[in-house]
């Protein structure tokens, strides 16, 4: 063993995928994972700044590691993710002089270069890893059967509140052969389900020559032996077309599940957010999905307390969600982000009002999801078994529509598709037994 590493990750699924990629590179060099950052020879913080709270958590964690390094001087500390962005490393180096390496999102080369430059690791051979690709899956010690696979990096849409374009750069598509090679490698590690990732995943292929798009890629991934299910997120209402919806409807392995944020129900707020669609256009997208895929599940994202949002604006957002009977809504309280358009606006909704609106929306979500799920009582659903819960003596998995199911089953069914009859339904989970 060369040494130990620890990667602390917060934020989106893209960060999780980036951390997996870095872990695979470090393990290829001979490093082994350790569960505690303060015990590691290499400690990495993979950060998120989409909201203030995760940024504050990262800073707190980083300062704690700085204290550890005073007594462990050979320790390498690396900071990566959206906190570093594409232009922030110089300022961060002044604020946190104990950090050795700063890495922009999805860019791990800087840490590998630094490790190989250290005398204690001079015996390592760069040819042990392939930098800049994703084809080295980390050893699947925990027997995970699902994995995230980035297919687009960055974002060019530049919504008024979003810092991603400034931290991850413009969107660009990965080459299809790289994506398919990565998934083949993941299958070899026991992965049964992959989720194709992009900040706006349905823009895949816009910058590639040829007939490549998300619909084409979904069909290609579904052809891979060993893959049982394929998902994709996050979609943007302006880029979903009939071809993509039809592909989901007609391709057996592609799950009938969409992550489709609407963010606000007020056209005035949507225009200020620079989302690029109206409430009516969002409703039309949902209608088109349900016409072709009646059993589709649609999750969404919502921001409350955006600058100038009135009570009437908020109630329009609640009404849109309630009338469409969407499934899970991820609710975020607005916080201004540096360099964004909205950060120049007055943050005029109080913290107390933001909290109130978030709580009120949560209550509506719980009610609507409870009503949606109650319709499934007594039904038989297909569940991919992801984990056995020793303490409860039951399995955990999800339906194609991403519904969380706990069920009883005798014997080992990890990574298998199981038919489960539902005996109980709640807003956020279902309980049943294998038949």
Image: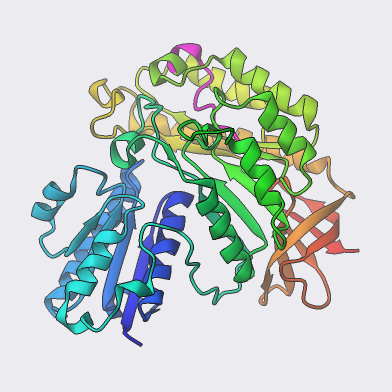
x, y percent for residue 25? 38, 69
Q: In which quarter of the image is residue 434?
A: bottom right
Is 268 situated left or right of 418 in this image?
left
x, y percent for residue 57? 31, 55
Q: In which quarter of the image is residue 169?
A: top left
Placement of the N terminus among the 4 image quadrants: bottom left
Residue 260, magenta (yes or no): yes
x, y percent for residue 316? 55, 17
In magenta, the rendered stretch is 258-269
Q: Indicate whether 219 appears above or below 278.
A: below
- Can residue 325 be seen at all in this image of the molecule? no
Placement of the C terminus among the 4 image quadrants: bottom right
Q: Nearer the viewer, residue 354 or 377?
A: 377
Q: Which of 433 and 190 is in front in this view?
A: 190
- Can residue 174 be seen at all in this image of the molecule? yes
Residue 296, magenta (yes or no): no
User: In the rendered view, how is the structure colored?
Assistant: rainbow
Please, which residue is most extreme toward the bottom here?
1
Q: Nearer the viewer, residue 393 or 279?
A: 279
Q: Which of 131 and 120 is in front in this view?
A: 131
What residue lies at 39% left-to-right and 65% top-to-bottom? 130
What residue lies at 72% left-to-right and 28% top-to-bottom? 289
Q: Indicate whether 305 appears above or below 412.
A: above
Please, which residue is most extreme toward the front here?
210
Is 117 situated left or right of 24 in this image?
left
Q: Indicate whether 269 appears above or below 241.
A: above
What residue lies at 55% left-to-right and 73% top-to-bottom? 140
x, y percent for residue 387? 67, 69
């Amino acid at each position: 063993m060369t040494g130990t590493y620890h990667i602390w990750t917060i934020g989106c699924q893209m960060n999780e995928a980036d951390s997996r990629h870095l872990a695979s590179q470090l393990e290829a060099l001979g490093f082994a994972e350790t569960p505690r950052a303060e015990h590691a020879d290499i400690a990495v913080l993979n950060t998120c700044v989409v909201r203030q709270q995760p940024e504050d958590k990262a800073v707190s964690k980083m300062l704690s590691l700085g204290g550890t390094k005073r007594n462990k001087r050979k320790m390498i500390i690396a900071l990566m993710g959206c906190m570093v962005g594409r232009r922030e490393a110089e300022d961060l180096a002044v604020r946190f002089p104990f950090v050795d390496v700063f890495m922009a999102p999805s860019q791990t080369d800087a840490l590998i270069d630094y490790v190989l430059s250290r005398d204690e690791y001079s015996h390592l051979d760069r040819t042990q890893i392939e930098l800049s690709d994703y084809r080295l899956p980390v050893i699947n010690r925990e027997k995970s059967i699902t994995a995230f696979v980035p297919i687009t990096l960055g974002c060019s849409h530049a919504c008024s509140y979003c810092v991603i374009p400034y931290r991850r750069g413009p969107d660009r598509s990965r080459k299809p052969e790289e994506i398919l090679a990565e998934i083949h490698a993941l299958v070899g590690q026991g992965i049964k389900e992959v989720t194709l990732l992009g900040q706006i995943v349905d823009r895949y292929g816009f910058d590639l020559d040829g007939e490549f798009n998300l619909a084409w890629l979904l069909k290609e991934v579904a052809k891979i032996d060993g893959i049982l299910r394929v998902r994709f997120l996050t979609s943007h209402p302006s880029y979903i077309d009939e071809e993509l919806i039809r592909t989901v409807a007609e391709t057996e392995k592609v799950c009938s599940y969409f992550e489709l944020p609407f963010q606000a129900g007020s056209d005035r707020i949507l225009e200020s957010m620079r989302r690029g669609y109206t409430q009516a256009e969002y409703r039309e997208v949902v209608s088109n999905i349900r016409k072709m895929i009646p059993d589709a599940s649609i999750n969404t994202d919502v921001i409350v307390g955006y600058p100038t949002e009135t009570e009437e604006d908020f109630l329009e957002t609640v009404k849109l969600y309630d009338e469409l009977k969407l499934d899970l809504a991820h609710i975020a309280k607005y916080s201004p982000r540096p360099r964004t358009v909205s950060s120049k606006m007055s943050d005029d909704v109080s913290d107390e009002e933001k909290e109130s609106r978030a709580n009120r929306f949560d209550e509506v979500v719980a009610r609507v999801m409870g009503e949606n799920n109650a319709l499934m009582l007594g039904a038989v659903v297909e569940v991919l078994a992801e984990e056995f819960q020793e303490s409860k003596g039951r399995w955990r998995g999800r339906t194609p529509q991403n519904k969380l199911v706990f069920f009883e089953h005798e014997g080992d069914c990890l990574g298998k598709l199981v038919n489960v009859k539902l005996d109980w339904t709640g807003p956020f989970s279902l309980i049943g037994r294998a038949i």
